[in-house]
Amino acid sequence: MQITELFDIEVPIVQAPMAGVQGSALALAVSNAGGLGSLPCAMLDPAGLHNELTAISRGTSRPFNVNFFCHQQPVADPSREAAWQQLLAPWYAEFDIDPAAITAATAREPFSPALLEVLAEFRPAVVSFHFGLPDEALLRPIRTWGTRIVSSATTVAEARWLESRGVDAIIAQGLEAGGHRGHFLDDDITTQMGTLALVRRMVDAVRVPVIAAGGIADSAGVSAALALGAAGVQVGTAFLLCPEATTSILHRTALTGPDASHTALTNLFTGRPARGIVNRAMRELGYLNAAAPAFPLAGAAIAPLRVTAERRGSADFTPLWAGQNTAGCRPVPAAELLRSLAPTALQSRAQ
Ligand SMILES: Cc1cc2nc3c(=O)[nH]c(=O)nc-3n(C[C@H](O)[C@H](O)[C@H](O)COP(=O)(O)O)c2cc1C
């Protein structure tokens, strides 16, 4: 089944949820244009979620997707924190930062009963998860609303795991994709493959619709994913320059300059591998540093360096999440971008 039918949308494109760089405005623009807009909720508390869902519900009667992280919250390990801060000491000294003043990391909360309670008021058409699935007790109510449940898989084994738990569709997240890897069964990143190979193998392995994600940035790429058997695509990076996104000026500048051709997986900013544009922090600390505390705790110690550098107009310590393929990034309204991404035969259906 194609996702146009599954989600009741016009064009088979999901705008990827992208925490930190977008809110309801981008989701609304895409849903109103005939795609599936997504609201990322990893950094929203229940009140924030309520505000954003109210804005979307007022702005559209079309289907939209609400996305949550569902990681296990780690127990803070003071000795690991101390070792991490010790490693960062030369940069603290350079920026004149007192490590004693460091506060908790930017919250990245997993899906919870409190968030479910807010969601129940709105009953969105689609809910997607990153890092597996939450407990069945949290999923059961969502199923009763008729909401479609989707999650990312980065390997065939993860796709089979999700299928056995009754998801309605699976996002095949290829290695090219921007932002956090959605892996959840195995954190060995040597298991990760590119979108082309992953989609093909997943389509063969599971019966539920597979949505291709990672490096898709134009209409030909969308058509190629569909030809491989994907039921639709999820596109993130290409939307980062749209005026409806909240992407910072520093991030936009990096996306449009020569640095954008250099991306890598890094765990420095959160503790989990995520793809972003290579910057000074990544070059000097190593992209993947074994000392980084568990997700999402690593971010607390880097945050003061980021804040101080950004005040000086530098993105040296800023996570610049982006996929390998930034060729599709254009500063045009999201509806126009969506139209240009649609397979030629469907372009007239995107409004
Ligand atoms: C800036 C950015 C933030 C992201 N944040 C999230 C998120 O909050 N939730 C999620 O499920 N995926 C997130 N992703 C991953 C996307 O869902 C998707 O896998 C990816 O964007 C697809 O690859 P592409 O960026 O090459 O289009 C993010 C990606 C980017 C680029």
Image (cartoon, rainbow, N blue to C red):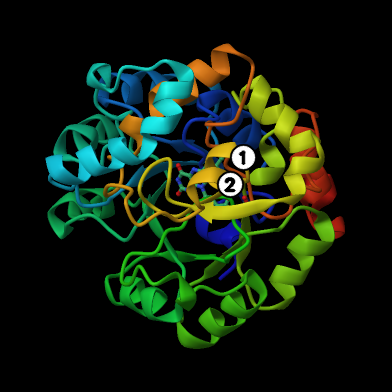
Please tell me in which quadrant of the rendered image residue 161 appears.
Answer: bottom left
Is there any visible trace of residue 283 in the rendered image?
Answer: yes
State the residue position of label 1. 279
State the residue position of label 2. 283
| Of the pair 291 and 165, the residue shown nearer to us | 291
Please tell me in which quadrant of the rendered image residue 226 appears.
Answer: bottom right
Q: Secondary structure at mark 2?
A: helix
Query: From the Cβ of disc 2, is ligand 1 less than 8 Å away?
Result: no
Residue 202 higher or lower than 251, as above or below: below
Whole-number angstrom distance, CA of label 2 to CA of label 1: 6 Å
Q: Secondary structure at mark 1?
A: loop
The residue shown at (83%, 62%) is 220
Please tell me in which quadrant of the rendered image residue 91 appears.
Answer: top left
Mark 1 Cα-neighbour bin, 10 Å: few <14, some 14–19, many ≥20: many
Residue 205 higher or lower than 303, as above or below: below
Q: Are discs 2 and 1 less than 8 Å apart at CB?
A: yes
Residue 314 higher or lower than 173, as above or below: above
The residue shown at (42%, 50%) is 267
Report x, y in % for residue 67.
Answer: 40, 43
Q: Amino acid at mark 2?
A: Arg
